[in-house]
Image (tube, grey):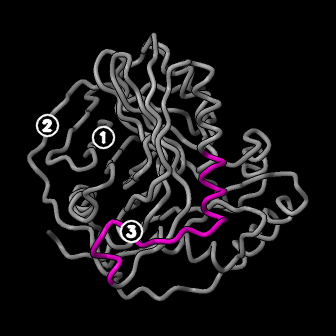
Amino acid sequence: MSAYAIYRLPHADHATLIQQTEGEPAEYLSCIELNGKRGFVVAPFQVTAQQPILLIRPDVIKTMESVGLVSDSVEDRNHTTCPTDSSYAIDFANYHAQLESGLFRKIVLARCADEASEEPIDPMELFHRACALYPRMFISLVSTSKSGVWLTATPEILLEGKDSDWRTIALAGTMKLAGEQLIGEGETVCWPTKDIQEQRIVTTYIAECLEQFTGDFHEEGPRTVRAANLVHLRSDFTFTLPDSQHLGDLLHTLHPTPAVCGLPKRETFNFIIQNEHTPRRYYSGFMGMLDPEDETHLYVSLRCMNIEGSHYHLYAGGGLLKDSTEEQEWQETEAKLETMRRCIAIKNM
């Protein structure tokens, strides 16, 4: 089976197919190795020889017909929220103890939930469902022999631009919309201090990263943005780069951001790898088209699921601060998991 990726940019009325017709995608053990490269990138949270950065060579680039766009003001399906499981409770207690001791300022705790359907659903059908449900998000379906099949619906830009004009965002804080809030864009949301602090941590980190590559960047925000039935706090960074052939260096510095890892970055990353019950694999990595000669669109791999026949491994996480509570954080992950659960449950479109 040839490796392929199909993606739809936010608010776009078409999708793009990237296909490698021969051989396996190139494998890299560092983002720096992506300097000057072109192709569809599939990067994991933790890069290893068994779980490398993959680059799908664009032997075929095809624009697909318009995929149906509908409002993402959809009601939750009847999914019963289960109580916190023991693995999550253990991880939360462990993570939170580090925050209370002052060792970390923020750390992200992720989990995996398994779902199943009576019959396997064609991955392309799931892709079209996601496109129809979530017009505001970056939707991608990736299939390689190394990674398996992944569907992603994410609101978070890691790096996007062309020539010398680039942008990235700081995205943190999560609240679920309900009732009349679903009509608008979340304008009436009142953000708790915890979410404001979390978003500021991510914003400060990204500014410090950009300072290493450019003296010309501008920050706007934060503002409330909607992604399906959730809203987040977002700050936008626009900046110039003198050389687009060294995007790998910038990616190496940015990834993983505190939005999926924590601060201090290296210490929280190592702690997550050693202590989180479920390996993240390609969840909370990044993916998208890398093209230093044309347009680059790379997004953080959030709201993911790994598809194995009629079984689906759904991933979600949340940022923990010192005043976080287990129940609130669990409910946040449940709300995020609902993004992919809807794709499985909804009828053919």
The quadrant holding residue 290 is top left
Locate residue 204 relative to residue 244 in the image: left or right: right
Contact flag, marks 2 and 1 (Cβ < 8 Å):
no
Q: Residue at x 73, y 46 (%)?
A: 263
Q: Which residue is mark 3?
A: 186
Q: Residue at x 25, y 34 (%)?
A: 18
Q: Mark 3 vs mark 1: which is more N-terminal? A: 1
Q: Residues within 10 Å of mark 3 (few under 14, many from 20)?
A: many
* Mark toward the start of the polypeptide (2 vs 1): 1
The residue nearer to you, when weighing 222 against 278, is 222
**Residue 25 is covered by the magenta coloring:** no
Residue type of the residue flagged with mark 1: Ala
Could you say whether the residue bearing mark 2 is in a helix, strand or loop? strand
Q: Mark 1 — residue?
A: 5
Tag 3–tag 2 contact (CB < 8 Å): no
**In this picture, is 244 found above or below 12?**
above
Which secondary structure dominates the residues rendered in magenta? Answer: helix
Q: Residues in magenta?
A: 180-202
Q: Which residue is mark 2?
A: 63
User: Residue at coordinates 45% horizontally, 41% vertically from top-left?
Assistant: 236
Q: Is residue 29 visible?
A: no
List x then y, in percent, for residue 210: 57, 27
